[in-house]
Image (cartoon, rainbow, N blue to C red):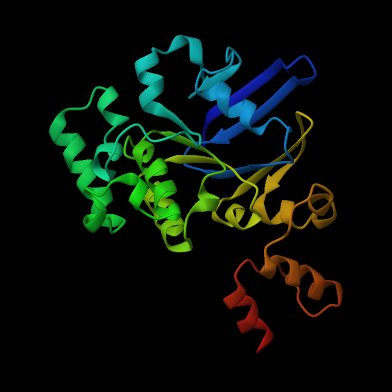
Amino acid sequence: MENIIEFRHTNYSYNGTNAFNDFNLAVEAKDLVSIIGPIGSGKTTLLKMLCHKLPNDTCYFEGQCFNLYSAEVLKKSIVVIFDLPFVENTVREELSSKIKTLDFDSSEIDNRCYELIKLFGLEDDENTNLDRISYNRQYLIKILRYLIINPKVLAIDNLLVNLSKKDKDKVIDYIKKHKITLINVTTDLNETLYGSKIFVLENFVMIMEGSTISVLQSDTLLKRLGFKLPLAVSLSIELGNYGILKKIYTSNEKLVKELWK
């Protein structure tokens, strides 16, 4: 699989103290990856480079430097979601707020709104004022207003953690169905189980990268960084140390089933 996003030999100083020095990171097309690390490790800085809030002349999309693409192409292809306030009043208005700024015809926008409203059970809230819906659903709308674009790459800055498990699963299923590459910055290691790879940052340095399971097995490092392992993974490691289990389980149900054999 070819890389869709790359940071190649990135050098960038942030606030005169923190800096990327010859930093490299590559994400394969249609992959779901997680970026984790303590506060101030450089995670959000990378996402700001992806959406032109910071210099990005060492960022590459589908093998070409960002500078070789028009702004319109990049806005449709690469979407970064931060925790920003609403710009409209109702759920439906907010869902269509971002896509309307791009070159989509009105019928396509209506079709995509209908699809998301139906998929996420928002029919009763479609014309409801945003300040009257639940906290979790507000964050769902903040994600859907960008997901509706169906970009090639979607990066999320620690917002999935605010969703219910049901809505989170649906968002991930939608991303997979539409073959969208996901870069998920998160503080919740349970979310890393959705993806195949984890990048670990500390002080603007990549201190570890690898498959999700291999990184989660580095429990000493992750605990030092302040992370709590998913329950099934933590128990699998502990029981493995006693020779009771021979593999890592990511699902509580599968772990219990194995223990009851």
Left or right: 258 in relation to 171: right
- Residue 169 vs residue 91, the one in the foreground: 91
Q: Is residue 258 above or below residue 7?
A: below
x and y percentages locating residue 119 in the rendered image: 28, 56
Q: Is residue 247 above or below residue 66?
A: below
x and y percentages locating residue 207 in the rendered image: 79, 37
Residue 261 at least partly seen: no
Residue 220 at least partly seen: yes
**Residue placed at 65% from the left, 30% from the top?**
25
Q: Is residue 173 above or below residue 25?
A: below
Q: Residue 230 occupies which quadrant of the picture?
A: bottom right
x and y percentages locating residue 169 in the rendered image: 44, 58
x and y percentages locating residue 58 in the rendered image: 61, 15
- Residue 201 vs residue 249, the one in the foreground: 201
Q: Is residue 28 above or below residue 172?
A: above
Farthest bottom residue? 261
**Residue placed at 35% from the left, 38% from the top?**
145
Q: Residue 218 occupies which quadrant of the picture?
A: bottom right
Q: Residue 77 occupies which quadrant of the picture?
A: top left
**Residue placed at 79% from the left, 31% from the top?**
203
Left or right: 136 in relation to 148: right
Left or right: 185 in relation to 203: left
Q: How many marks?
A: 0
